[in-house]
Image: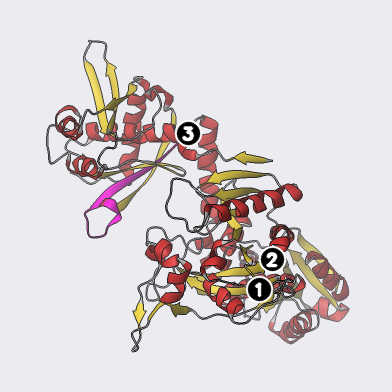
Amino acid sequence: MAAVAPRYEESYLYRLRHSAAHLMAQALTELYPGIKLAIGPPIENGFYYDVDAPTPIREEDLPKIEQRMKELAKLDQRIVCITADDRDSARQMILDETTLGQDKEVAEYKLLLLDAVPPGEKITFYDQQRTDREGNFHRFIDLCRGPHVDSTKEIKNFKLMSIAGAYWRGDAKNKQLTRIYGTAFETKEELEQYLHNLEEAKKRDHRILGKELGLFMFSPRVGTGLPLWLPKGAMLRDVMVDFMKKEQLRRGYLPVVTPHIGNIKLYEKSGHVITYRDKMFPFMEDEEKETYILKPMNCPFHIEIYASQMRSYRDLPIRLAEFGTVHRYEQSGEVTGILRARGFTQDDAHLFVRPDQLLEEFIGVVDLMKAVLDKLGLKDFRARLGTKDPNSSKYVGHDDNWRAATEAIETACQQIGMSYEVSPGDAAFYGPKLDLIIKDALGRDWQMGTVQVDYNLPERFELEYIGEDSKPHRPIMIHRAPFGSLERMIGLLTEQYAGAFPFWLAPVQVAVLPIADRHVDEAANLAARLRDEHGFRVQLDDRRETLGKKIRETQLQKVPFMAILGDRDIENGTVGVRSREEGDLGAMALGDFVERLVKAGH
């Protein structure tokens, strides 16, 4: 059932996009003499190239650059890898042989990149070469590790997308370069589908919908990546939190609450300071010279709660759950609305289990995660097992613990019949993890819920329980977060449903619309009955506006149902009903309307 996940870096698509970046660089050197090339890698959905241009490059210039790329691609230029004999010869190649020009200043960034190549590492260039009809030899050489495709004729289906600013080496102290983004695919159909999905994504952009629907906002006075939740957004959060809390209580979880800051010593003990330091906000020191940080994760706090008293084997499993707000420093260019924020709330829990309980508890967590996705209507997902990269030093703990944890996840997946792909290098720093990758309505993949098996933090904190043999034993930890984070999940759901949330989740479920001022009192009574007697989330629109305008604006707010009251409805004890999905349903007895609402909520 396990499959090794194909690494994007090893795919043909990766090589194709890498070559498209070089093709764009070649076109730029022809169109903008004296341009300084910096770096041009493939990225998740395409490629980019950073350049220092002698004249500004604007969005309206992209078609011209794209056209020259197409002309160069059709020339069937062979793409050949050249290995430099040594660093000096590589430097000479940059200065004398490349189409960067025989100008040290033009080659500025390439020389800096060459200087950054570690001693002893092979230095390679990729040469796009051709001979024209007159027998003249042409070439474009770029310092690069590769890999690339064999010929530019393979680069057929591409499009330049946008222009942005980017600091050299990501440092705001350095010069700002021009970054040109593009994308490329193997087939025309894939490119067209991607561009179509992008247009659909613009309509579903959670940042736009969040503002239009009154869910959340951002303020430059508050800061980048720090959302302010508006009343409807706060209600949406509350609905999701209430749902999860009920599920957790039903499954034996115990609620806890922990502070927003903690002593740095706690995170030194856990190892987070070493592995996560660049994501932590600046440290703070109090008058007693103790150093504190904004917490980037909740697990060390839950560990302290577990360790606060002696535990018996009879006490385990202990399942501690918290909706804990954490803060992580994301660079401003990486922040994307609430999908990637600097402050967010995790539906976090940590289970402390005996070895003989590990399998059952892990299966229980996966079952919870699947139940959550089903309730949210996210039915298209796959599992990915993130394992340790043997060539990386970012991990902590003994290899034996890593093997045991990985085997536990594999065994659990086999027992519940869940297929999974293996992705080396995607483990947490303290243990392997199983991620659920969700495919949304536009075919985009999102890594959301996660569950991790951890032998290492219990060892680092010397956690114990007294076994049946009256001797101390080490528990195993399971880290889990079915939502991942409230912010990220709400952002995904907003785009998945284009703001038209399912009835049970909608911030406002029913809008009550009186036709005229004389109907307002009866409409207020109806709203109160629906809210107080039946528990629905109701909004009364008693503004002095025409009914048509009220209906149009309620439709734009994507409210599932409207209840309209006029003279005839009050006289007959009915309510005029409009459905977001079905349109005008006509007059309906109140009891029948309530029954329809109850049915919609299930």
Q: Earlier in the sequence, mark 2 or mark 3?
A: 3
Residue at 41 percent of width and 73 percent of height: 219
Look at label 1 and name its amino acid: Tyr
Q: How is the image coloured?
A: secondary structure
Q: Looking at the picture, how far across and down is residue 310, in whole percent?
A: 64, 80
Residues packed near mark 3 inside 10 Å, few (<14), some (14 to 19) or many (20 plus): some
Q: Looking at the picture, how far across and down is residue 114, in whole percent?
A: 22, 40
Q: Which residue is mark 3?
A: 13
Residue at 47 percent of width and 65 percent of height: 341
Q: Examine the structure image and report whether residue 424 is included in the region drawn in magenta.
A: no
Closest to the observer: 204 or 313? 313
Q: Secondary structure at mark 3?
A: helix
Q: Which residue is mark 2?
A: 354
Q: Is residue 585 above or below residue 386?
A: below
Chain part drawn in magenta: 169-185
- Disc 2 and disc 3: Cα gap in Å? 45 Å
Look at label 2 and name its amino acid: Arg
Q: Is residue 551 left or right of residue 53?
A: right
Q: Which residue is mark 1?
A: 465
Look at label 3 and name its amino acid: Leu
Q: Earlier in the sequence, mark 1 or mark 3?
A: 3
- Disc 1 and disc 3: Cα gap in Å? 51 Å
Contact between marks 1 and 2 (CB within 8 A): the answer is yes
